[in-house]
Image: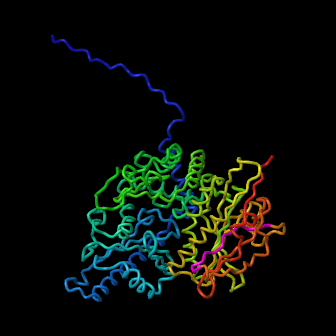
């Protein structure tokens, strides 16, 4: 009889011990995701179907106008080898709209791609003129001097940002693949930057393993960043594309995780992240098209970046270039806070900025008319980050925190009063150097106003009635509520009778020193001697332009007289 072999049974391995709480079940994850969706809906993070259709209609209408304009330009230039009706033209949204995370009332970023025979000035003159003639268009303005030249407008109530890129072709078909890198060869740098917005957005969607979970997690992080006042690229924090890359990296690390788990891991991972180690969705790539690429191995300037968050499309760039040491510290604190919070409602609580610091700088931009105000506010706001950077360089300033929420103010019942917008910068001083410290911030405020007025005159946008000012405030100088934030105090317009004084910078002059005259400030009755930070604000200095076109210098302390310079005196508590 044949002998049967006894099967060998592998010895059982001892069960590995698992420490900590058990992982959530599928039912628990679904319940948490549903709770997350409901709270996002309560904050208006989702658009209705009617609003979505309206957005699509606006995009299609703008695409028709763009193609009509291209045909008109072909006929006007009369190129013999170009058939106007076949020139095509491509108009594609990018940013939050293309990512599928646009909230109610959000603007739409749109890329317009035209043929190479067009000039950029044609788009910013001829096409802008065509848009102005449309009854649906309101508040249109072209900003050609921006890093990425843009046309801002409102179309049927939706804010639109249009950028323009031209490719080296006589036709732009609808099916043109804008992700092809060879289109960038020989392209002008403004077109490369404009095209990069769409290319980065599309690459992010292609690199995440689960788009639906990515979108829900990104909506959550964007709402958190906005609620905690750390959502602003221009003011030194992070913009939408930076937050999208951060979330996409977590999605790559945890490809099967639910949206709620991705949010939890977002705070856990970035709470432990050691900056300036870069965040990248793919390896660095250089096509050698003579375009600037972020690469600290080659470019020494890239090694100094505080928070590198690198785009996945060539040419790869750092989207967080504007981040400063202060804004990085603030975002790290907020991420650490998010890591310790267990409930969604607590995560989205708004901070009380006016309770956070003892010392503040109040910036103000004012215009004579509502038509002038948006452009003036945009210019002043674009320079605030530079003021923050300069303040950080002061040896006794340990933090300069700009509140990203501005405070518009319209006069009630007074048609001649200027329209104002205000910003607050919270300051932390290093008071360990001695019991009695005198901190002079006048040169930094003066430099800020010099830059604002210089740019305004260079761009030929300065109008009569446009002013800007900066002054020191202490925490107790806030009296009434902030707009849309009950219980939060705001700056009192009238100085308190306790002898409060202001710190501000004089306006620059675009004329020669011989032609420049000093005009007496409306606040010059107040002394400009040293003041204690507990007393309040000092004399305010308004910056304005004379009717003759030259900028006046308000009466301010002479820089050569130390006793008359505006200073903040800190008394260290005993």
Q: Which of 242 and 20 is in front in this view?
A: 242
Q: Does the magenta stretch include residue 8?
A: no
Indicate whether 270 appears above or below 124.
above
Picture quarter containing residue 513? bottom right
Picture quarter containing residue 56? bottom left
Indicate whether 139 appears above or below 381.
below
Name which residue lies at 45% across and 60% down.
Answer: 241
Indicate whether 11 appears above or below 401.
above
Magenta highlight: main SS: loop
Q: Nearer the viewer, residue 156 or 298?
A: 298
Q: Where is residue 146 in the image (x, y as percent from the top left)?
A: 46, 71
Indicate whether 75 appears above or below 335.
below
Name which residue lies at 50% across and 78% down.
Answer: 459
| Number of dots carrying numbers | 0
Q: Position of residue 453 (x, y in %)?
A: 57, 75
Q: Position of residue 396 (x, y in %)?
A: 66, 53
Q: Where is residue 406 in the image (x, y as percent from the top left)?
A: 62, 68
Farthest residue toward the left? 1
- The answer to whether residue 40 is visible is no
- The answer to whether residue 111 is visible is yes
Q: Does the magenta stretch include residue 509?
A: yes
Name which residue lies at 79% across and 75% down.
Answer: 525
What residue range appears in magenta?
A: 500-512
Farthest residue toward the top? 1
């Amino acid at each position: 009889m044949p002998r049967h072999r006894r099967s060998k049974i592998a010895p059982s391995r001892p069960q590995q011990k698992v420490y900590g709480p058990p992982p959530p079940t599928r039912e628990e994850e679904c319940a948490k995701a549903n709770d997350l969706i409901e709270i996002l809906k309560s904050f208006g993070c989702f658009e209705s179907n009617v609003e979505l259709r309206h957005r699509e209609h606006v995009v299609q209408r703008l695409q028709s106008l763009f193609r009509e304009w291209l045909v008109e330009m072909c006929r006007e230039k009369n190129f013999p080898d170009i058939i106007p009706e076949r020139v095509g033209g491509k108009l594609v949204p990018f940013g939050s709209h293309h990512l599928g995370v646009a909230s109610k009332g959000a603007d739409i970023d749109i890329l317009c791609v035209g043929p190479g025979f067009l000039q950029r000035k044609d788009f910013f003159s001829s096409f802008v003129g065509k848009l102005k003639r449309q009854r649906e268009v309101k508040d249109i303005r072209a900003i050609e001097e921006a890093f990425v030249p843009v046309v801002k407008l409102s179309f049927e109530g939706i804010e639109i940002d249009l950028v323009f890129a031209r490719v080296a072709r006589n036709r732009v078909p609808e099916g043109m693949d804008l992700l092809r890198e060879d289109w960038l060869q020989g392209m002008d740098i403004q077109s490369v930057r404009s095209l990069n917005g769409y290319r980065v957005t599309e690459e992010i969607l292609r690199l995440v393993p689960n788009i639906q979970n990515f979108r829900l997690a990104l909506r959550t992080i964007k709402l958190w960043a906005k609620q905690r006042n750390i959502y602003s690229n221009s003011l030194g924090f992070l913009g939408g594309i930076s937050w999208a890359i951060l979330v996409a990296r977590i999605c790559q690390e945890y490809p099967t995780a639910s949206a709620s788990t991705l949010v939890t891991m977002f705070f856990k991972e970035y709470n432990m992240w050691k900056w300036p180690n870069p965040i990248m969705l793919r390896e660095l790539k250089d096509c050698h098209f003579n375009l600037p690429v972020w690469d600290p191995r080659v470019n020494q300037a890239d090694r100094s970046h505080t928070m590198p968050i690198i785009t996945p499309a060539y040419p790869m760039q750092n989207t967080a270039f504007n981040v400063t040491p202060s804004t990085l510290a603030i975002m790290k604190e907020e991420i650490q806070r998010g890591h310790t919070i267990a409930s969604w409602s607590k995560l989205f609580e708004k901070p009380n900025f006016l309770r956070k610091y003892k010392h503040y700088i109040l910036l103000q931009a004012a215009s004579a008319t509502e038509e002038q105000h948006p452009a003036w506010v945009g210019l002043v706001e674009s320079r605030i980050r530079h003021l923050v950077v300069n303040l950080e360089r002061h040896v006794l300033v340990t933090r300069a925190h700009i509140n990203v929420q501005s405070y518009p103010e319209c006069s009630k019942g007074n048609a001649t009063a200027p329209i104002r917008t205000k910003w607050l910068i919270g300051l932390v001083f290093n008071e360990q150097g001695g019991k009695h410290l005198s901190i002079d911030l006048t040169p930094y405020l003066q430099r800020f106003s010099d830059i604002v007025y210089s740019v305004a005159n260079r761009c030929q946008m300065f109008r009569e009635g446009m002013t800007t000012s900066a002054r020191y405030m202490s925490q107790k100088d806030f009296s009434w509520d902030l707009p849309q934030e009950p219980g939060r105090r705001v700056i009192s317009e009238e100085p308190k009778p306790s002898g409060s004084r202001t710190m501000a910078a004089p306006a620059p002059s675009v004329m020669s020193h011989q032609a420049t005259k000093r005009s007496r400030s409306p606040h010059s009755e107040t002394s400009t001697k040293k003041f204690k930070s507990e007393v309040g604000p000092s004399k305010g200095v308004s910056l304005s332009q004379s009717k003759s076109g030259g900028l006046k210098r308000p009466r301010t302390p002479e820089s050569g007289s130390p006793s008359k310079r505006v200073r903040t005196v800190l008394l260290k508590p005993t």
